[in-house]
Amino acid sequence: MQEKKSIHGSWASRWIFILAATGSAVGLGNIWKFPYITGENGGGAFVLVYLLCIALVGIPIMLAEVFIGRRARQSPYNALQELAEESGKSKNWGLIGLMGMLAGVMILSFYSVVAGWVLQYIVSTANGSLNDITSEQAGAVFSGLLADPSTLLMWHSIFMIMVVVVVIGGVNAGIERATRIMMPALFILLFVLFGYGMSTDGFEAGWDFMFDFDFSKLTWDSVLVAVGHSFFTLSLGMGTIMAYGSYMPKRASIGSTVLAIGFLDTLVALVAGLAIFPIIFSNGMDPAAGPGLMFVSLPVAFGQMAGGQFFGTLFFILIGVAAWTSAISLLEPTVAFLVERMGMKRSTASISIGIVVWAVGILCLGSFNFMSDVTIFGKNIFDTLDYATANIMLPLGGIFIALFAGWTVKQKIAADELNFKSESLFKLWLFVIKFIAPVAVAIVFVLNL
Ligand code: TRP
């Protein structure tokens, strides 16, 4: 068969694909969200369920997304349609891609607001205003930021412009090269902070909190949060990895690539937790403090550390970059779709969706101040978008992608694309994607109702 190419281009190598996909996966989900939801859901047992979800559900579905994208070489909506047709099934499967695009817009609108907090903290750390700060003061600084819509709007707007500019350029050598430098740097700094966490007297408490499996603290709602987060952190369930897969070189092995991405993403989340919780415990702060956890604990730690102003600034810059590369990947599938389907120019498509996301983002940042009394089922708009995407739309998208890959796509196509070393490995994957992954996620859903 003649090899298809995406009209949007393709990664230079398998290594670049790993970097780009890891850039997408590693983001605020790992460093901001994972520690705070672990704190809210009681620690160890939650972490264990999350790890199980990554292994049993996340990795198999990531394999599915990558091979679907690479086979069809198109944006998710079109890719799903084409593979369905190739397998003699209904084109309605494309609708999963539609839900994915909607989820992408919803996620990015609150993601950008949080990324905006990070940008503010780069400045505050760099100018020394957080030096020697106590935990009470750090809490007050964070609440002060949330109460100030114009500052939030400024950073949210700046971040969205950064995202749109890169997406207009295509997934180009620029961002690939930036990722190549920034990702290793992020790892190194994370370990520096981890080392600091180890040196505090809260390290044991932090470690126990994350790895003592006390199942009495686990509710079905926590399990759903763990399932949802495994999708969120691996960028699954909405087509991001499918779109990135469509730019993947043909000869690269999908299996080892996906394992590398899953491993790196999990490592960053765990190390972020082990860096943050000791700081929390050694300063007598509350692990269940919610979304502000990182923004309150890190300034306190950096404030006390030798060279903390420098390292702190660098660290927030790197979180900003991690958020940036993830945000780009949230926009890309929809932009690729508009270019393919509507014949739009990439710039027009990127700016149009960028404006939609920006507008929805204003409602999200208003949730902390001028719109704090607007609630849906008792949650403000920010929390609603987070909950609806991570805990409903992504898992639902994941179930459908699993069913599509396991039952709808011809087995021969899946086997050809995945090209595992052994037949039994393929059989194992097929069993998991047909039964285990969709059923497990569905059960968690139902038990939550
Ligand atoms: N995975 C990213 C993070 O952890 C966020 C992200 C990027 C994402 N693309 C996605 C989440 C697609 C869900 C779906 O921060």
Image (cartoon, rainbow, N blue to C red):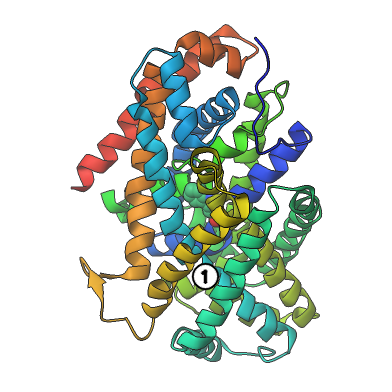
Residue identifier under label 1 = 114
Instruction: Judge the density around disc 1: few (<14), some (14-19), many (≥20) Cα neighbours within 10 Å.
Output: many
Residue at 62% from the left image edge and 90% from the top image edge:
133
Q: Is residue 85 above or below residue 256?
A: above
Q: Is residue 256 above or below residue 117?
A: above
- The mark total stands at 1
For this view, does 175 lie left or right of residue 84?
right
Q: Residue furthest left?
A: 449
Instruction: Decide which of 412, 268 is in the foreground and name it.
Output: 412
Task: Give the image quarter of residue 298.
Answer: bottom right
Q: Secondary structure at mark 1?
A: helix
Residue 294 at least partly seen: yes
At x 66% / y 88%, what residue is drawn? 130
Q: Position of residue 183 (x, y in %)?
A: 74, 53
In-image side of 329 versus 214 (left or right): right
Residue 77 position within the rendered picture, expressed as x and y whole percent measured from the top left: 45, 35
- Image spot of residue 36 (x, y percent): 47, 65
Res. 193 image quadrant: bottom right
Left or right: 287 in relation to 277: left
Image quadrant holding the N terminus, namely top right
Q: Is residue 409 something one can see in this rendering? A: no
207 or 437, which is in the foreground? 437
Measuring from the top left, give residue 41's x and y in whole percent: 37, 59
315 vs 33: above or below: below
Amino acid type, label 1:
Val
Residue at point 52% right, 26% down? 68
Q: Nearer the viewer, residue 285 or 289?
A: 289
